[in-house]
């Protein structure tokens, strides 16, 4: 074990960042207060650049929507647009419009607000359990085990910078790159693909909805890296600014985010200062649990 890895375990033992994720997803509901919509309030996680992490507001919006549907209806898809950057030093208000409740499906529109302005607009769909046709993509072969790959703390240990410390010790997910990470250095091979293993540092409660929302949180971490890799860019390339424009996600099968998940990503196109990326998420035993698409 390297000193950096030992330091990481020590940090986690002192203050498990998974507890931050659980707190973020515990929205207040104003004692059931409603106008024409259901209203919730959520905290923001502090960020070195003071902007709300997109995955946070996605996950919180899902939790708000989940609070308004029957317990037997599980989210299976969502489509959201990031409208404005959020302030990580301010809480977020979520309003949920109950668009439809049918025999098997429910639809919800969720808007996330700060200072009266929408920062995210999302529609999510929920379904009762059903049986039907079934198939799935195969998990890629030859992927190294996550335990053999360096952690973010090990990769960034030589950088004494607030952003490096945040990514190493304050993110609730342990993210391990299958190919050399592009946090600081541009990739040597220009390929439109990327893959990471990820899981929360600590255990999560057994609530299945919490795991579904947390997966949305983590799905925003590295999805655009396939775009950067193809164009020989790193996250620190001078003069470059990266922002998420929209995010779509489909949940296929039950998932636990406190167990290792493989997130395989690729970029089919980049043009007009925009890049599109897609991703498939697999459990360690090969179950295709979710699919993601994002343009940035």
Image: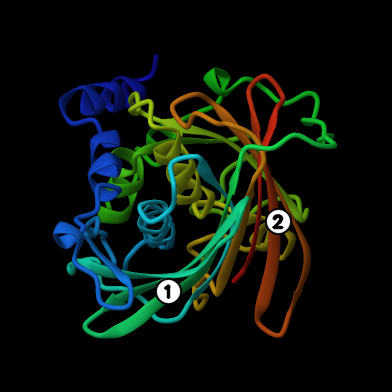
Residue at 41 percent across and 58 percent down: it is 65
Q: Which mark lies nearer to you, 2 or 1?
A: 1
Left or right, residue 7 beside residue 90: right
Instruction: Name the element at disc 1.
Output: strand
Mark before the other along the chain sequence, 2 or 1 = 1
Location of residue 226 (image quadrant): bottom right
Q: Position of residue 247 (x, y in %)?
A: 57, 65
Location of residue 174 (image quadrant): top left
Residue 155 visible from this viewpoint:
no
The answer to which of 32 and 114 lies nearer the viewer is 32
Q: Are marks 2 and 1 in contact (CB under 8 Å)?
A: no
Label number found at residue 120? 1
Q: Note whether 200 is above or below 105 in the view shown.
A: above
Residue at 81 percent across and 35 percent down: it is 136
**Quadrant showing the N terminus:** top left
**Quadrant showing the C terminus:** bottom right
Left or right, residue 89 beside residue 8: left
Q: Note whether 122 is above or below 141 in the view shown.
A: below
Residue farthest front in this picture: 103
Label number found at residue 278? 2
């Amino acid at each position: 074990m390297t000193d950096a890895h030992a330091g990481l375990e020590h940090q986690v033992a002192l203050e498990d960042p998974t507890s931050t994720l659980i707190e973020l997803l515990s929205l207040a509901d104003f004692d059931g207060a409603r106008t024409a919509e259901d209203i919730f309030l959520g905290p923001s996680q502090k960020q070195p650049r003071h902007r709300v992490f997109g995955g946070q507001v996605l996950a919180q919006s899902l939790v708000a929507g989940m609070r308004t549907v029957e317990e037997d209806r599980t989210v299976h898809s969502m489509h959201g647009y990031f409208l404005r950057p959020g302030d990580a030093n301010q809480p977020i208000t979520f309003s949920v419009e109950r668009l439809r409740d049918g025999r098997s499906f429910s639809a919800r529109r969720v808007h996330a607000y700060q200072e009266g302005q929408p920062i995210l607009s999302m529609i999510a769909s929920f379904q009762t359990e059903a049986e039907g046709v079934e198939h799935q993509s195969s998990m890629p072969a030859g992927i190294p085990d996550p335990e053999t790959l360096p952690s973010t703390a090990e990769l960034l240990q030589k950088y004494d910078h607030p952003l490096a410390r945040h990514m190493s010790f304050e993110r609730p997910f342990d993210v391990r790159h299958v190919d050399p990470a592009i946090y600081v250095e541009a990739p040597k091979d220009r390929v439109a693909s990327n893959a990471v293993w990820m899981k929360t540092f600590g255990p999560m409660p057994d609530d299945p909805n919490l795991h579904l929302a947390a997966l949305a949180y983590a799905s925003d971490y590295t999805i655009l890296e396939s775009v950067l890799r193809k164009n020989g860019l790193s996250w620190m390339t001078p003069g470059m600014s990266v922002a998420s424009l929209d995010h779509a996600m489909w949940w296929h099968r039950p998932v636990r985010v406190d167990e290792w998940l493989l997130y395989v990503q690729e970029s089919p196109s980049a043009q007009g200062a925009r890049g599109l990326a897609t991703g498939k998420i697999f459990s360690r035993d090969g179950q295709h649990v979710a699919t993601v698409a994002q343009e940035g």
